Image: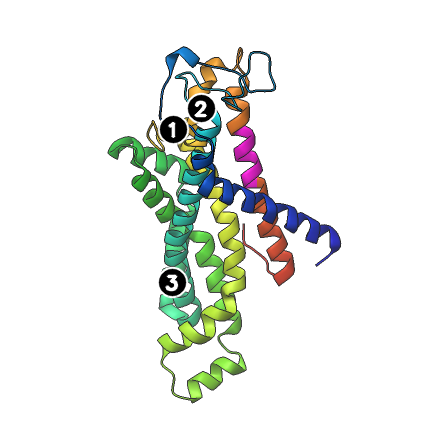
Amino acid sequence: MPRLTQISFVIGLTIVGLVFVAAVIGPWLTGHDAFAQNLNARLIPPVWMEGGSSLHWLGTDQLGRDYLTRLLYGARISLFIGVLTVITSGLIGTSLGVLGGFYGGRIDDAVLFLITCRLSIPVVLVALAVVGLIGSSLTLVVSTLGLLLWDRFAVVARATTMQIRSLDYVNAAWCSGCSPLDIMRHEILPNISSHLLVVCTLEIALAILLEASLSFLGLGVPPPLPSWGLMIAEGKDYMFFSAWVIMIPGLALFTLVLGMNMVGDGLRRAFGTQVIK
């Protein structure tokens, strides 16, 4: 891995690690409740701005809730949605891709048909329609995104499985009497895991962005849960007079997605993989 890529990977890994630690323990260290309202302390600016208070390092929102606590709690929600979405989509896409690449023939044709159908569906529009019809909830957002973001896993798993299904160690497993399921579990999956790991990092970033987009439109995580997209949406009415209410969660979202993409790019270069976009 080139030195510049190593530095980029380390920076990305540091960003993701700090966000993860802050999401896990941060809300307990601030001394504030993320949902407690105080209308007498509305829109207090961050501590470095005129009128800021040391009691609220990043100020308060339009309902007097501590912004730092809500930001840290929002990091927990973003990572939770990103990881669960990737687990769901990864299981679906990897299963289909490995089956199609391993067996070929009509099974592969069916998998390709499903991938083509999925690629023809606009993710954001379908997610908006589903959430708008059924109603917004954390579980629904995770389920919807998980069922819509499996195509890249399927494409990568299928392509890599087709590359290795005729290699010597797979043929040796056939000769030793292993069943197709055992070969896929013990020979195929371990040898394509590096490719899938790269896809995981990129899909987590995409899931976090899509959740923020849905929340910004009012169809994602329901209030009062402090999603970063929802925080930006709630602060847009005050952006001309208190710009920090959208700049802070927007910067946090940008930093986390950048860190995830830097980690994914570093892993891709380290493993020498090519991810289908």
**Which of the numbered marks, if any, corresponds to residue 95?**
3
Confirm or deny contact between disc 2 and disc 1 (CB under 8 A): yes
Q: Which residues are magenta?
A: 250-257
Q: Which residue is mark 1?
A: 33
Q: Is residue 25 placed above or below 231 in the rendered structure? A: below
Count the marks: 3
Q: Nearer the viewer, residue 32 or 44?
A: 32
Q: Is residue 39 placed above or below 90 in the rendered structure? A: above
Closer to the chain start, of discs 2 and 1, is: 1
Q: Please tell me in which quadrant of the rendered image residue 133 appears.
A: top left
Q: Nearer the viewer, residue 163 or 235?
A: 235
Q: Position of residue 5 (x, y in %)?
A: 69, 52
**Which of the numbered marks, if any, corresponds to residue 98?**
none
Q: Which residue is mark 2?
A: 66
Q: Nearer the viewer, mark 1 or mark 3?
A: 1
Q: The residue under label 2 is which amino acid type?
A: Asp
Instruction: Tell me how far mark 1 sits from mark 3, CA to CA.
Output: 42 Å
Q: The residue under label 1 is which amino acid type?
A: Asp
Local secondary structure at mark 3 = helix
Closer to the chain start, of discs 2 and 3, is: 2
Q: Position of residue 148 (x, y in %)?
A: 38, 46
